[in-house]
Image (cartoon, helix red, strand yellow):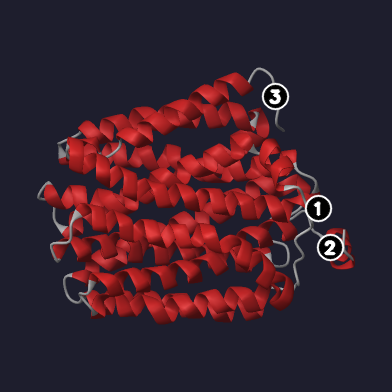
Amino acid sequence: MTKTMQELSSTQSTSPFSVGLPALYIIGFLSGISMGLFTPFISTFMAQHQVDDVWIGANSTVFFLVIALGSPLVAKILCQFGLRRTMTLGLVLMGLSAPLFPMTTQVSLWFVIRAVMGIACCFYFVCGQTGLNYFCHESNRSIVNGIYALSFSLGFGLGPVMGSALYNFSPQFTFLLGSILVFSGVIVVWIGLPDKFVVFQPSSRTGIFQKLTLSLYGAFAFGFAESTLVSLYPVYLLRQKYSVEYIGYTFSVFVIGGLLATLPVTHFADRFGKLKILLISVCILIFSILSLSLAENSIAVQIFAFTTGASLTPVFPLTLALIGDKLTHDELSSGSALFTATYSFGCSAGPLFSSIVMQIFGNHYIFSLMLMIFALFMVLLLQKSPKTKYT
């Protein structure tokens, strides 16, 4: 362990609001706004310009694939420029690139802009996850992850509400508002985040991967589901003749479910075991996704959107918290980078493969791959639960 890490470890507070963490929660909130506002309305904007489903899915795939491939680069930049400067770079890059998307109708330019947005998101997403691992205490890792996920979900829910209220008036103004909010994160970073030069400890990637097989599968599954929902479900609802306003409200209901469930679920995980609570969440999620794909009544759609959000959102903090149970403190940063990359690969695969399935079998099969992935996750959890105990 380096001297910087030793000093940090010795001064850590057991409070989930100790130095550095509140700033990360706020950045998580702003990250949620950017994804909740930009991602579904990018898909909506492309669909309204008669872009094919596969291209819409591929555009989202590029965004998340860049995040996955950029994680090792961000790790190196963190070593040289520190947490504060690296995160600032990502926020500024996102704030500058996002407003450009509705200013063109060229598909090729949309891909370039989305790739730049992916690079920007990679910077502040990886920095946020790494900062959580460094500034939290071993005794409050679950609740810290839960609060961060709650902050992200709150922003993710407000994004579509703000976007739906402004989109019909002006798509350009919608993206500009999101850009201004992202830029405000720079102030938060420089006021509330210690300027730590985080060092990624040399570790065997193979060894860490073997320790984190279950966590990484959960990260992939969560990313696959989340990206499919935010990227393709708006297109599905649009083709079911629902209005843009209804699409925004449906996503808000989805996020409200996650907001209400995240902290109680992470609390129960600390009390009764992470694997047991994670298994329950996955079972509820499978039922909710299946019901959501079959629902045609607008009220039923809202109900199952709520239960899907309530069962899906806690999967992220629970699988992230499992990393702390399996790795030493020196390995946490490497594990976090691998977790972020795997999550992003899931996000990359979700829209692309789900859009292909929709094109071949029809719109109602939008969630078929997602169901298969979580069914396998349920089987893995059932196999691990009797043998492994997580505290």
Amino acid identity at mark 2: Met
Q: Label 2 to label 1, Cα distance in Å?
A: 9 Å
Report the quarter where the C terminus lies: top right
Mark 3 lies on residue: 388
Mark 3 Cα within 10 Å, few/some/many (few <14, many 20+)? Answer: few
Say whether residue 260 is left or right of residue 147.
left
Q: Position of residue 127 (x, y in %)?
A: 62, 65
Rendering quarter of residue 186 = bottom right
Mark 1 lies on residue: 330
Say whether residue 253 is left or right of residue 373.
left
Amino acid identity at mark 1: Asp
Q: Label 1 to label 3, Cα distance in Å?
A: 23 Å
SS label for mark 2: helix
Amino acid identity at mark 3: Thr
Residue drawn at x 36%, y 31% is: 371
Rendering quarter of residue 357 = top left
